[in-house]
Image (spheres, grey):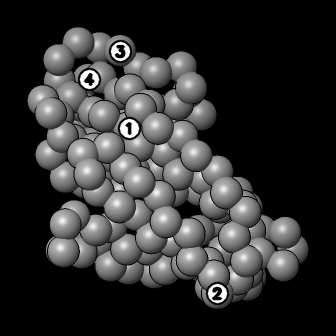
């Protein structure tokens, strides 16, 4: 067994007021967590990963996201997350995501704004 991992990269900025319609279901989360006026989805990838295996995702700006699904327990999917920029880990944490939920990680500067990473998971149960 394992889970499906969904990774989205969003460029957020205060130039303009575009809200990418593909992000509609996450709008309340963006609004409550971040102060930006414009959100654009620039990468969207989903992949099946076995428990304990690792999946690497190339993000805009030369960054790299490593996701290792740990387990499914009490309705939550546990994921080890490493966001790597060159040789530095910007984020190194374990997330317990509600099954089929999405977690937003506000990240590094990117062009005129910042990169926000949306991490979602759905277990096979």
In the rendered image, residue 15, in percent from the top left (x then y), is placed at: 17, 17
Looking at the picture, does residue 15 appear above or below residue 78? above
Residue 40: image tag: none
Nearer the observer: mark 1 or 4; the answer is 1
Nearer the observer: mark 1 or 2; the answer is 2
In the rendered image, residue 17, in percent from the top left (x then y), is placed at: 29, 14
Nearer the observer: mark 3 or 1; the answer is 1
Which residue matches tag 1? Answer: 10
Q: Is residue 94 visible?
A: yes
Q: Earlier in the sequence, mark 1 or mark 4?
A: 1
Q: Earlier in the sequence, mark 4 or mark 2?
A: 4
Residue 18: image tag: 3
Q: CA distance from mark 1 to mark 2?
A: 27 Å
Q: CA distance from mark 3 to mark 1?
A: 12 Å
Going 46% across and 38% down the picture, which residue do you hit? 43
- The secondary element bearing badge 1 is classed as strand
Residue 69 left/right relative to 64: right
Task: Residue 84: name its quadrant.
Answer: bottom left
Q: Earlier in the sequence, mark 3 or mark 1?
A: 1
Q: CA distance from mark 3 to mark 2?
A: 38 Å
Q: Earlier in the sequence, mark 4 or mark 3?
A: 3
């Amino acid at each position: 067994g394992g889970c499906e991992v969904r990774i989205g990269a969003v460029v957020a900025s205060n130039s303009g007021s575009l809200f990418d319609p593909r992000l509609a279901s996450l709008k309340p989360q963006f609004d409550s967590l971040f102060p930006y006026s414009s959100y654009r989805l620039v990468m969207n990838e989903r992949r099946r990963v076995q428990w304990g295996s690792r999946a690497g995702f190339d993000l805009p700006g030369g960054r790299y996201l490593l996701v290792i699904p740990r387990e499914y327990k009490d309705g939550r999917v546990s994921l080890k997350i490493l966001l790597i920029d060159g040789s530095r880990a910007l984020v190194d944490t374990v997330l317990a995501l509600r099954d089929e939920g999405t977690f937003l990680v506000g990240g590094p500067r990117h062009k005129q704004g910042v990169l926000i990473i949306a991490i979602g998971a759905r277990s096979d149960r």
